[in-house]
Amino acid sequence: MSKLSDINLRSRVAAWWGKAKSNRLFRLGLFGAAIVLITDQLTKYWIVQVVRLPELRKIEVSGIFDLTYVENYGASFGMLAGGMTSRIFLSLISAGVAVGLIIWLGQLRRPVATIGVSFIIGGALGNLYDRIMYGYVVDFLDFSGLMFPWVFNVADMAINVGVAFLILDAWQTREHPADKA
């Protein structure tokens, strides 16, 4: 990287940081992402270490919901499952999504979008932690009694809820163009 482009990048990062740190929604969004990340990791710890679900494999809770231990080596719903190459690829995607969304979060001025982005960041980081530390993501929430064939976790739920909030935000800003700032 040339010295001029390095100086340009530093000034752009400094300008972004100046705006982001004074943005109340940025701080709230980071706090929300941290809550999602912590909740995800605490529930996985509880399932693995306290309930000991890996040994039990499955606990039938009701006709529609069970706790089922799954080591997900892929992305959502087990897509792209593979070896070390898949693990590195999926980790890089998760990290890239989190960084990109943190940059966007620093610029956001809309509460609904902030909620959505913070949920996605927290979920992406929760699953990224698993993938780096264990080589797989711990899944355990099983609603197969509702004909939902996938087992998932709190991070997965947060990502999907976050996407729903972003869709709601897009719909609201379409309806009220003055709120796009």
Image (cartoon, rainbow, N blue to C red):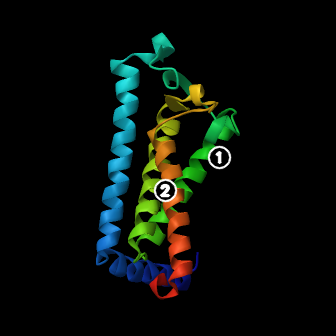
Whichever of callouts 1 and 2 sits on the residue coming sooner in the sequence is: 1
User: Looking at the picture, which amino acid does disc 1 mark?
Assistant: Phe
Residue closest to the eye, 134 or 33: 33
Element marked by disc 2:
helix
Q: Quadrant of the N terminus?
A: bottom right
Q: Is residue 4 above or below residue 164?
A: below
The residue carrying mark 2 is 162
What secondary structure is marked by label 1?
helix
Residue at (44, 43) in percent of width and height: 126
User: Does residue 75 appear in the picture of this structure?
Assistant: no
Q: Which circle marks residue 89 in the picture?
A: 1
Residue 112 in sight from this viewpoint: yes
Q: Residue furthest bottom?
A: 178
- Identity of the residue drawn at 45% across and 68% down: 113
The residue positioned farthest toward the top in the image shown: 56
Density class for disc 2 (Cα within 10 Å; few <14, some 14-19, many ≥20) is many
The spot of residue 179 in percent (x, y) is 45, 83
The residue closer to the viewer here, 111 or 79, is 111
Q: Give the side of residue 19 with respect to residue 71, left or right.
A: left
Residue at position x 49%, y 44% from top? 157
Q: Amino acid at mark 2?
A: Gly
- Percent position (x, y) of residue 2? 58, 80
| Pointer 1 local density, CA inside 10 Å: few below 14, some 14–19, many at least 20 | few
In which quadrant of the rendered image does the C terminus lie?
bottom left
Q: Position of residue 161 (x, y in %)?
A: 49, 52
Task: From the viewer's perspective, tell me whether residue 155 is left or right of residue 25.
Answer: right
Q: Is residue 103 above or below residue 38?
A: below
